[in-house]
Image (spheres, rainbow, N blue to C red):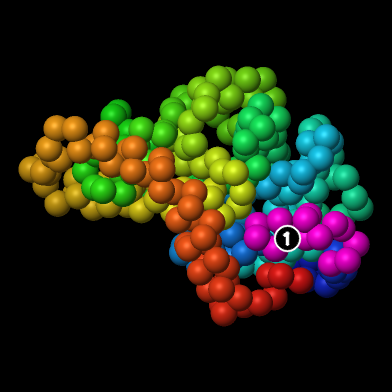
């Protein structure tokens, strides 16, 4: 209880005006993503993580404070870390070591990986444990399935040597099923990454529901999963950037505008 009281009394000074406008915008988007993950019930207490890269040669990126619930994360509380996992600026918070291992691997290896998001939802974990992974049972699954990679479980991701294997398994894909573990999405910005993650999670949830209803699932006609995959790859970025993410950002402000402080 003493630790909980101490944490509740931590003052988080606003970084607005103290960082570049570009960094502040990224902080606001990432904090909104944390609040939306909590809103949709995808959080796992404090144990998953979303990150965003700060533009520049230093390869700094933002992670959540390990002590905060996702509905408590704010733009100013996000911790900026370097490639060794050390905070760049003074902070009262720590970060998740497993989060650093997974996210630093992708951010450092992929120039297009400006945002990386990883979840442990029950549906995502269940599909990651299925031998065939995500099946082409729904339109949502077909839109993202061809862009998914797989990484075998190696224990809690605190071994920095695992980074090379994560990167090798991910390749140029935009998402990953971490076997027996959960889901991961990569995006060119926070909005793209969140929308991709939303589709992966919805597809996993629908698969679990479909399989629980019996073993007589309807398979789509030959060629349609491939067609849907092409449509998904072509449409995701404009849909995310122009339509879905702006709408979700408005939703985050309606839920609690405090995330943007």
Quarter of the image with the N terminus is bottom right
Instruction: Judge whether residue 40 is colored magenta.
Output: no
Packing grade of label 1 (10 A; few <14, some 14-19, many >=20) is: some
Query: Residue 49, position in %: x, y?
Result: 61, 48
Along the viewing direction, whichever of 8 and 186 lies nearer the viewer: 186
Kindly identify the residue that appears in the image at 65 percent across and 42 percent down. Answer: 114
The residue nearer to you, when weighing 176 against 69, is 176
> Taken as a whole, is the magenta stretch helix, strand or loop?
helix
**Magenta residues (range):** 16-30
Where residue 185 sits in the image (x, y, percent)?
Answer: 51, 42
- Which residue reaches farthest left? 216
Please name whichever residue, 161 or 238, is drawn nearer the observer in this view of the structure: 238
**Residue carrying label 1:** 25
Residue at the image position 77 percent from the left and 43 percent from the top: 55
Please name the residue shown 71% across and 56% down the image.
26
Residue ID at (38%, 36%) = 128
What is the secondary structure assignment of the residue under circle 1? helix
């Amino acid at each position: 209880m003493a630790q909980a009281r101490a944490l509740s009394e931590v003052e988080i000074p606003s970084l607005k005006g103290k960082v570049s406008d570009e960094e502040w915008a990224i902080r606001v988007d990432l904090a909104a993503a944390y609040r939306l993950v909590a809103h949709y019930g995808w959080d796992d207490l404090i144990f998953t993580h979303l990150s965003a890269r700060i533009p520049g040669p230093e390869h700094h990126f933002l992670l959540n404070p390990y002590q905060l619930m996702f509905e408590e994360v704010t733009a100013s509380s996000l911790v900026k870390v370097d490639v060794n996992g050390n905070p760049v600026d003074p902070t009262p918070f720590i970060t998740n070591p497993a989060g650093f291992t997974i996210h630093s691997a992708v951010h450092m290896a992929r120039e297009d990986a400006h945002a990386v998001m990883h979840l442990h939802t029950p549906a995502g974990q269940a599909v990651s444990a299925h031998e065939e992974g995500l099946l082409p049972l729904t339109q949502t699954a077909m839109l993202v399935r061809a862009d998914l990679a797989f990484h075998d479980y190696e224990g809690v991701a605190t071994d920095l040597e695992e980074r090379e294997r994560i990167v090798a398994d991910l390749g140029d894909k935009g998402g990953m099923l971490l076997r027996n573990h959960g889901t991961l999405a990569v995006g060119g910005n926070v909005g793209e990454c969140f929308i991709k993650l939303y589709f992966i999670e919805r597809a996993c949830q629908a698969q679990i529901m479909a399989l629980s209803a019996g073993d007589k699932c309807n398979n789509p006609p030959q060629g349609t999963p491939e067609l849907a995959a092409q449509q998904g790859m072509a449409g995701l970025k404009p849909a995310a950037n122009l339509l879905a993410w702006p709408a979700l950002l408005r939703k985050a402000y309606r839920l609690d505008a405090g995330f943007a402080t």
